[in-house]
């Protein structure tokens, strides 16, 4: 029986643990606190801060783990890649590539100013640094995830007001400002096999308009934004980025904005997304991306792609969201009667943890429209 260690126990890592158990894989999980549902489902949970690499390696050796991986975590992927390289365990991308994608400044610099689809940016270390971009621009921590600390800055007063708060979300205490691209947002889930794009599905990324930083409200497939021409431009961008980063196998996730029918990269990461998109895409395409990822990683098997069906209908994954630092109360939500799947992150009365600090995901549901 194969043994897999999942770094993290949040709901997205719980998804992976459940799917691995369906595959007959023995599951292990570690995190610095027992504060996520993944610990309940794992065969073995251990309190380990997975940034303490030596402790993780000791745990892998002690339990003879065959693979270490994570889902939906930018922090975990560079760590799992580095450990896998050191221990000779299976992995899709190098730790160098994972680190580039995990740091917004490194990613922008690596792609370069002449890369079609990259956007103008500037590194800001100090609140007194000269601003070279025009207002408005997006300000974000250089190495965080989940829209933490991300803000649209309209003038110098807003920059001064929010800079320090943004910087606190960065482990490296650095901030990046990026050209603001006004237009519809997309998410793209893709899968590479031997350098070719074997799975590619863009979806419309709908955000809460009343909150800063593009906080996600729902994903809709197929995209209503794209036509056949713009769809090919997005696919070309995905392929060019994968080639530039040297990603030949495994999952890829993009956030993209469209401007005048041209796609621009907001985020790119060599992993499954953190929004349970695998679940809505399972209904839409017939392909289970988590199963595909682990069968490919553990056994070199990509037969899950044969389950791909003709894309029909429209599916929506919508999040239940509420303010942080209050008790969860699901009676405030009306989940549609035609729901295909739903999940709650908390029990009623549990305290909603602050992740982005504005409007937190506390559950989701999937419907076919």
Image: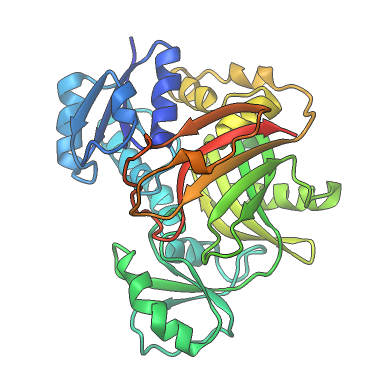
Name the spot of residue 310 as percent of width and height, x first. 79, 24
Residue at 45% from the left image edge and 83% from the top image edge: 159
Look at the image and tell me whether residue 43 can be seen.
yes
Where 123 falls versus 59 (above or below)? below
Where 332 falls versus 282 (above or below)? below
Look at the image and tell me whether residue 271 can be seen.
no
In terms of image quadrants, where is residue 180?
Answer: bottom right
Where 105 falls versus 56 (above or below)? below
Name the spot of residue 41 as percent of width and height, x first. 33, 22
Q: Residue furthest front?
A: 331
Whether residue 242 sits left or right of residue 329 in the image: it is: right
Name the spot of residue 46 as percent of width and height, x first. 19, 30
Residue at 53% from the left image edge and 87% from the top image edge: 155
The N terminus sits in image quarter: top left
Whether residue 285 sits left or right of residue 304 in the image: it is: right
The C terminus sits in image quarter: top right
In terms of image quadrants, where is residue 94?
Answer: top left
Whether residue 152 sits left or right of residue 27 in the image: it is: right
Name the spot of residue 90 as percent of width and height, x first. 38, 28
């Amino acid at each position: 029986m194969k043994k897999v260690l999942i770094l993290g126990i949040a709901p997205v890592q719980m998804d992976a643990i459940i799917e691995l158990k369906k595959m007959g894989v023995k599951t292990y999980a570690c995190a610095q606190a027992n504060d996520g549902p993944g610990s309940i489902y794992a065969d073995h949970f251990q309190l380990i801060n997975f940034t303490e690499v030596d402790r993780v390696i000791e745990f892998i050796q002690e339990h003879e783990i065959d693979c270490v991986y994570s889902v939906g975590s930018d922090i975990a992927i560079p760590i799992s890649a580095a450990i896998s390289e050191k221990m000779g365990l299976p992995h899709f991308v190098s730790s160098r590539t994972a680190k580039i994608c995990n740091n917004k400044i490194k990613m922008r610099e690596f792609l370069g100013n002449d890369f079609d689809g990259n956007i103008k940016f500037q590194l800001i270390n100090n609140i007194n640094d000269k601003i070279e971009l025009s207002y408005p621009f997006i300000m974000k921590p250089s190495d965080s995830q989940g829209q933490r600390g991300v803000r649209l800055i309209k003038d110098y007063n807003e920059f001064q007001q929010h800079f320090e708060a943004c910087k606190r979300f960065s482990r490296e205490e650095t901030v990046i400002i990026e050209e603001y691209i006004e237009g519809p947002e997309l998410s793209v889930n893709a899968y590479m096999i031997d350098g070719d794009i074997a799975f590619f599905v863009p979806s419309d990324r709908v955000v809460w308009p009343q909150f800063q930083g593009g906080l996600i409200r729902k994903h809709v497939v197929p995209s209503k934004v794209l036509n056949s021409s713009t769809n090919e431009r997005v696919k070309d961008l995905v392929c060019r980025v994968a080639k530039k980063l040297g990603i030949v196998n495994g999952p890829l996730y993009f956030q993209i904005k469209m401007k005048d029918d041209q796609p621009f990269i907001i985020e790119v990461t060599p992993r499954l997304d953190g929004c349970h998109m695998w679940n809505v895409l399972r209904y839409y395409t017939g392909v289970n991306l988590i199963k595909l990822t682990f069968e490919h990683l553990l056994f070199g098997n990509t037969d899950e792609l044969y389950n791909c069906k003709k894309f029909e209908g429209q599916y929506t994954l919508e999040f239940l969201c509420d303010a942080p630092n209050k008790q969860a109360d699901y009676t405030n939500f009306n989940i549609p009667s035609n729901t295909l799947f739903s999940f709650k992150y908390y029990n009623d009365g549990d305290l909603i943890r602050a992740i982005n600090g504005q409007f937190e995901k506390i559950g989701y549901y999937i419907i076919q429209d």
